[in-house]
Amino acid sequence: MDDLDAVLDRARELVTPDDAERSALATATQRLRERAERAIADRGVTAEVVLVGSTARSTWLPGERDVDIFVQFPADLDREELQAHGLAVGHAVLGNGHEEYAEHPYVTGTVEEGPLDAIDVDVVPCYDLEDATDIRSAVDRTPFHTEYVEERLDDDLATEVRLAKAFATTIGIYGSNLRTRGLSGYLTELLVLEYGGFRALLEAAADWQPPVVLDPVDHGTATFDDPLVVIDPTDPGRNVAAVCSAANVARLQHHARAFLDDPDPAYFETEKFPQSEVPAITAAGLREHVERRQTTPVAIRFTAPDLVDDDLYPQLRASLGGVVGLLERTGFDVLRSTTAVADGDAILLVELEVTDRPAVERHEGPPVTVREHADNFYEAYADDPEVYGPFVEDDRYVVERPREATNAVDLLAGDALFDVRHGAGVERRLQHEYEVLVGVELVDLLPSFADALAEYFDPRP
């Protein structure tokens, strides 16, 4: 047995819930299911209770107390009735639950059952359909996913899935929410099934050449531009990996190579993995980074919009992209950028290579030989007293004209900030109030943004 096999054997023990935990969760799940069935009977409506997700497929990790209960209603039921019945059942199952909204509302909450002091439960209404291609909303396809995986996953493969989930969690790429943009549970299961195990998945991922296209049942009907494409076995037009970012695909490759080269059980123990040990950043440490790098970090701080993460983070990234584009168009090169949320505030952080530019900028026109365009360019500037030129350099007209902005900080503090594309909620917050922090002023972001700044100034793969 080589070191890799020994580490994987040890890891299988780490990621497998013990008999007591399995039994307790099974008992709790059955009680929750029975509550849902009683609530359906009380409503006098036809519906079926289906257990989905990792609990249903035995791919949950020790300490993971998540139960997903789907209530399937007949396909001909009016959507408003489905929502009303679904919420009533959810509240009956979870006396202290609260409503959240995906494509339609559902009930979520935490319960205590037997020895398990905290079980996170979602009760989600959906339609009982014949085919996943007929879905009315995204949640309708989830039972099809459960059925597909359950038919193919034995106990050994379920353990391999748990290895993959733990590995993805420790390297920070587990989660299909739009904050993480990583691997969903279903995607992780499909990858393990595709390659026949965790080790084979890592060996394949280490050599991936994106775009990687996998079609488990060879029925895909669409093409995608994503770095990782896994055609949904239940829907030929859907990429299960669509949300997975190129950076997270690359992180999986990096850590697959690192683990195969140097097997370490810490990859399956989140609290011990070096990735989770980024040293805390202090005010003195932050000042040292700024002085050492001799760049100018600029943070725009504002009150974060009151949105769920799947709405908030795309808006923040859109705004960050707009700010970076504005700076680069006006001659201020951005070394790196990020966005973060903490304690009710959000920041757009850009690190500038230069903050001041000359009063004039060079602007090249078309070659003189391209007569119509050249004439238009010449006439546009010929009588402008603010420009130098037009003059001929090599084969084209050139002018030196006043620069739109000579200082990046002034640019971000002014009206130009609103000339770029922002997420709607972010723009409303910025219009109300924002603050620009420059250089060592970033210490004012501590301690709220300590984790985000530590990750930024101590970047890891």
Image (tube, grey):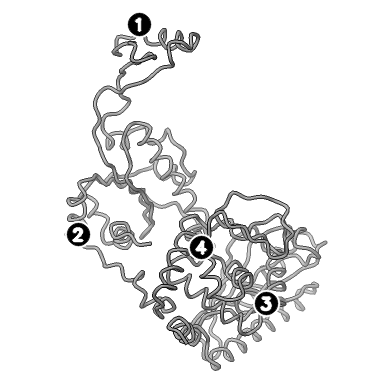
Of the pair 18 and 398, the residue shown nearer to us: 398
Nearer mark to the viewer, of 3 and 4: 4
In this image, 293 relative to 258: left or right?
left
Query: What is the x, y in percent for residue 81?
Result: 75, 62
Residue at image x 49%, y 43%?
424
N-term mark: 3 or 4: 3
* Residue under numbered circle 3: 51
Question: CA–CA distance between discs 1 and 2?
Answer: 54 Å
Structural distance between the alpha carbons of marks 4 and 1: 60 Å
Mark 3–mark 1 CB contact (< 8 Å): no
Asked where in the image residue 298 lies, by quadrant, the reply is top left
The secondary structure type at the circle numbered 4 is: loop
Q: Which mark is residue 283?
A: 2
Q: Is residue 283 left or right of residue 165?
A: left
Under circle 3, the secondary element is: strand
Give the image location of residue 263, x and y in percent.
Answer: 41, 77
- Name the residue nearer the viewer: 55 or 437: 55
